[in-house]
Amino acid sequence: MSFRSVAMGLLVATAVAMPLWAQDEKPAEEQYVPITTVDPRVPVDQLRVMVKPLTKQELEGEAAAWFKLLTTKARQIAAVQLGVKKTNEAMAAGDVEAAKESLLEAKNVKQIAEEKAKATEKEIIDAAQEELGIEGKEAAQQDEAEAENNAEDPMDVNAAADTKGKLLEDVTVLQDERTALSDRLEIVLLSLERKGGEVEEYRKYILAVSGIDVDTTDATATWAAITGWLVSKEGGQRLAWNIGKFALILLISWIVAKFVQALTNWLLEKKLRLSQLAEHLIARMIKNIVLVIGFAIALTALEIDITPVIAAIGATGLVVGLALQGTLSNFASGLMILVNRPFDVGDVVTAGGVTGVINQMNLVSTRFKTFDNQTIYVPNNEIWNNVITNITANHTRRVDMEFGIGYDDDFEKAEQIILDVVDAHEKVLKKPEPQVITHDLGESSVNIVCRPWAKTSDWWQVKTEVTREVKRRFDEAGISIPYPQQDVHFYTINKEGHPVEQSG
């Protein structure tokens, strides 16, 4: 069995039991020895399990150890980048001796940083291995192999470009290792923060040293940094994978939201039998909630911490509520409309000064579609606080019409003509029976009311067709439909001073 397998097995078991036996067997004043750093390349999912049972004090020790590894790696990256600068000096040097000196400095800077990083890592790993009772034979063999690979190359001024290329490759590798260490430190910090620890300084440092450094004065270094980041496992590959996960989660969220919306519509329609307006609104709200949750999960796939966003939303909730008092009033009115159900989708309604077909509603406004194909949004507050007339709420409606005839015409004959027209129309209902009766003697006409009943959907057709047919039948029967008129009389004064009427 390999060293890493044994270490991981013992590490998980020890991490779970550590808070219990540590308190019984170790004196309180003894300094805590970090154990999660036994393998700096420990998988992040396993590290989450290891740090979960640790106490605040133990996590502070773990965080300090991971932070030490991270700072050492950051210094190593800076040293290699300085080596790149020195190789640039060697390539630009005018004489051989100066070039060799610059190359030697670059080599020494890199070597010192590597030795320091290895010493720090070995110190931390050895302490964790000793604490867990694990021998690091395999680690020693690995150190020997790395020492062979890092044997000094001959100082050849003509090979300065190759040396620079190797250094740039080292920078890419080291940046990947730094990102991996930052991820693991962040896991420890998250657990420490949940248990009341201070982590702000650690995170500021992580932010300060993260990313790639681009030297715009050195085209070769810039190109190497960009291409190296794009192909690196912790750089471009990681970003591409995260973007893929982000898009996939959004797609799945949209599919799930549509399914939940359809299921909610079906349940509300079959089980609760609410109005279509309420069904659509509730289903749409549930769909939007699912989409918001999916978007939040998708953001975590991009490694974006949504906790500050949620906290900011909660903190600004009161301010937003005060600023949107009108909107909240519309919200309350929308709830009252849904509860009292004065209209539904497809109803013809007069409300808020608008007459049209109800098309859609949310908790802020209601959308009308007028008969001339305009779309009008009316605030719910304007609707609920005013008279609401639902024109199509009932299945049948009475059609009120009035016809005026001249005083010289036969009103009984006119009544019979109107009644015949109404009885002959196929859309007029037989029950209730239509009423045709002379009811008013106007200034210039005798007025006859006609009140047939029809289905609400046929109301307009009945009104227009009966009116047209009555006018045609009146013309055939010689019955006039008078228009308002006035008689004007002119008077003159005669010689005796009396007015005399003149015709005109």
Image (cartoon, rainbow, N blue to C red):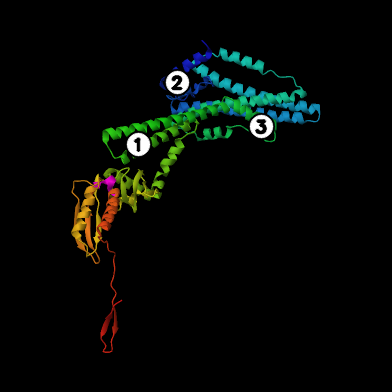
Q: Is residue 143 visible in the rendered structure shown here?
A: yes
- Density class for disc 1 (Cα within 10 Å; few <14, some 14-19, many ≥20) is many
456 in magenta: yes
Q: Is residue 192 visible in the rendered structure shown here?
A: no
Left or right of residue 252: residue 85: right
The amino acid sitting under disc 3 is: Thr
Above-or-below relation of 200 to 444: above
Above-or-below relation of 315 to 151: below
457 in magenta: yes
The amino acid sitting under disc 2 is: Ala
Residue corresponding to mark 1 = 283
The amino acid sitting under disc 1 is: Ala
Q: Nearer the viewer, mark 1 or mark 3?
A: 1
Q: Which mark is residue 148?
A: none
Residue corresponding to mark 2 = 15
Q: Earlier in the sequence, mark 2 or mark 1?
A: 2
Q: Secondary structure at mark 1?
A: helix
Above-or-below relation of 250 to 128: below
For the record, the magenta segment spans: 454-459
